Structures are given as C-alpha cells and as structure tokens.
Image: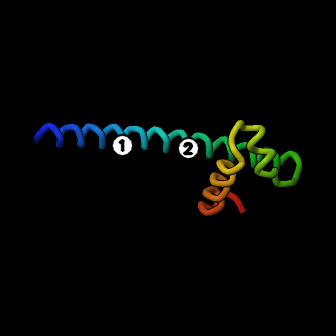
Amino acid sequence: MGLCGKYAQAQRESLARANTQRKKQGNETRGRVYALYTSVVAQTGNEPTARQMAEELGLTKRSVNMHLKALRSAGLLV
C-alpha cells in the first residue's frame, strides 16, 4: 500500500473511532432523556416539554426532540 493508501486508511480508522464515540455518547444522552421524561410523567402525570427537558439536561431543544423522536420510533414512548 502506498503512502496515500496508508493515509486514507488511517483517516478511515480515525473517523470510525470518532463515529463510535459519538454513537456511544448519543445512546447515553438518549438514556438521560428517557429517564427524565419518564420521571416527570410519573411525578406529574404530564409530558415535559422539549424546552423544559433541554434546560434540565443542558442540551439543545433540537437535540432533545431528536432523541424523543428516536424513542417514539423505537416504541419506548407514545
């Protein structure tokens, strides 16, 4: 493998590691979103807003909505 081939391979491996790390962090965040959502529903009987959850978790509203959508499509939330 030439110099360019080795460089490209190293870049692909680096990107793969970064993607794995981002996915792991996303799963952890999704777990935090799920835990907060179910906790608020259990305590109040009402669904929390994405804004409330974002403030509580230190996330953006967009990020919370993304995780809520994924949880709904997985059948964990209705």
Q: Nearer the viewer, residue 14 or 23?
A: 14
Q: Which residue occupies 54% across, 39% down?
A: 25
Describe the element under mark 2 as helix, strand or loop.
helix
Helix, strand or loop for disc 1: helix
Q: Which quadrant is the N terminus positioned in?
A: top left
- Mark 2 and mark 1 residues within 8 Å of each other at the beta carbon: no
Q: Amino acid at mark 1?
A: Ala
- 41 in relation to 9, above or below: below
**Quadrant including the C terminus:** bottom right
| Image point (38%, 38%), residue name | 17
Nearer to me, 55 or 39? 55
Q: Is residue 12 left or right of residue 55?
A: left
The label number, if any, that marks residue 16 in the structure image = 1
Q: Which residue is mark 2?
A: 26
Left/right placement of residue 24 relative to residue 44 reads left
Q: Amino acid at mark 2?
A: Gly
Give the label on residue 66, or none: none
Q: Where does residue 32 sit, x and y in percent of width and height?
A: 66, 41
Q: Residues within 10 Å of mark 1 (few under 14, many from 20)?
A: few
Q: Is residue 32 above or below residue 46?
A: above
Q: Position of residue 65 (x, y in %)?
A: 68, 54
View extreme (right): residue: 44
